[in-house]
Structure formats: structure tokens, C-alpha cells
Image (spheres, rainbow, N blue to C red):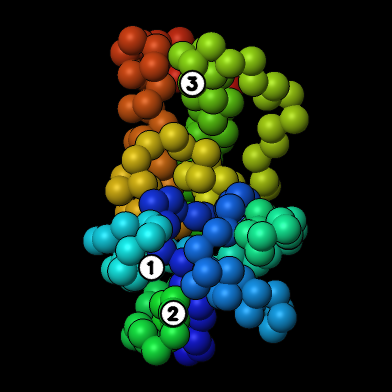
Amino acid sequence: MREMPLFPLDTVLFPGMPIHLHIFEPRYRQMIQHCLESSRPFGVVLIRRGMEANGPLAEPENIGTAAVITEVERLPDGRMNIIALGDERFRILELKHDLPYLVGKVECLPLQPPVTLEMISGLRRLRPLVPHYLFLLSRQFHENLDLSRLSMPEDPGHALNMAAGLLQIPPAEKQPLLAAVGATDLFNQVERLYRREIALLSGGALDHFAHSDLN
């Protein structure tokens, strides 16, 4: 168990995924400065109740992701633009309110093995769905998305987290993915959501693609 500064946001961060944040509130400028000085991560947690900014501290969900700051752009008035990378999942055991920002007593929550042969086979089905979904999504919003450099990690856990992070769905639907007990549970949820979203974006027809030799 350890203490971690917490940043309640209207977003869900997955391990291995980047997050870009504009830090403007004094309480979070103080928090980020503390993290920089102590080389500590902060925790990204989805807001359960409350507002993201300019109000009382929001009530967070109890499972979040540690974020390691990788880049900082300091602005003249004290604001900052930062990039952080999702590290490990954690569960909040206790909240502390004695600072301007939330601090949690947390425990690490690694994605539980084992990774079964069935799941590895399932990942072979999932991998081609990710670029296809992103292509359909970019076409929906009339954007030219270069997918040539998209590469899914070989590690099953990393691949699942990446697939989950790339889904453009409401945060309330992403939180159960982050809170998945094990790799098989996460895979089942992620595959179901990709097939649902692809069906919606393509007018309900996965037909040949879903059952092609790419599987």
C-alpha cells in the first residue's frame, strides 16, 4: 500500500496509453509540481460524482491508473501542458482530504494471468478488428487517419489495454474494462465492444471481414 496524488477526470486511462493534460487549476498545478519534484506518478481516476474543474473535489471511482509524467511544457502564467503515460492499475483503499487535491492510499492491481491458449487465439481475431474500427471511425468523421504505423503489442496484456484505450466510447463504458478482474474477462468485454462498434459504424454488417482469413 502506498499514497498517490489523484486527478479525477472525465476520462479513463489504460496502462501503456498516453494522456495529454492542460493543468490550469492552482490545486493541480501544485499536485503536478509535487510529482515532478519527487519523481512520483499521479493517479488518473474517472469521476463518479462531481465536476472535473472549478468546484469541490470530485468523488472518484475506486480503480484507476498511475500516470508517469514524460513531458512538461511550462507556460508563463504557471499553467502547464503535460504528457503522461499510463503505468499500473491500482485500487483506492482510502481517500485523504487534507491537501487541496485528493490523495489516495492505493494498492497495485495487476491484470491477473493466466493467459490461456483460447485467449491467444481470440487475440488473433481481435487484432484486425482494431484498425478496421479506426478506419470506419475516421471515415465517419471525414478524417484521413494513417494506420500504417499502428502496431499491436505482442504481449497479450499490453495489446488488450491498447485495444481498450483506443475505443471511442463513453467513459462509463470504459471503466468496467479498466476494472476487469482478469485478462480473459477484459478480452471478452473488449471483443464484444469492437464487434458492436464496427457493426454500428458499418450499418450492422461485419459479414466477410469478421470471418475472413485475417482471423
- Please tell me which of labels 2 and 3 falls first in the chain: 2
Q: Are dots 2 and 1 in contact, CB under 8 Å?
A: no
Tag 2 residue: 100
Horizontal and vertical percent position of residue 175: 35, 54
Residue 47 visible, this orientation: no
Horizontal and vertical percent position of residue 32: 61, 71
Q: Residues within 10 Å of mark 1 (few under 14, many from 20)?
A: many
- Please tell me which of labels 2 and 1 falls first in the chain: 1
- Please tell me which of labels 3 and 1 falls first in the chain: 1
Question: As drawn, is 74 to the left or to the right of 131?
Answer: right
In the image, residue 99 sits, relative to residue 170, either above or below, namely below
Task: State how far apart marks 3 and 1 are (Cα).
Answer: 28 Å
**Residue type marked 2:** Pro
Residue 207 visible, this orientation: yes
Horizontal and vertical percent position of residue 188: 37, 45
Question: As drawn, is 157 to the left or to the right of 36?
Answer: left
Tag 1 residue: 63
Q: Residues within 10 Å of mark 3 (few under 14, many from 20)?
A: some
Horizontal and vertical percent position of residue 200: 33, 19
**Residue type marked 3:** Leu
Tag 3 residue: 137
Residue that protrudes farthest toward the front in the picture = 77
Task: State how far apart marks 2 and 1 are (Cα).
Answer: 21 Å
Q: Secondary structure at mark 2?
A: loop
Q: Residues within 10 Å of mark 2 (few under 14, many from 20)?
A: few
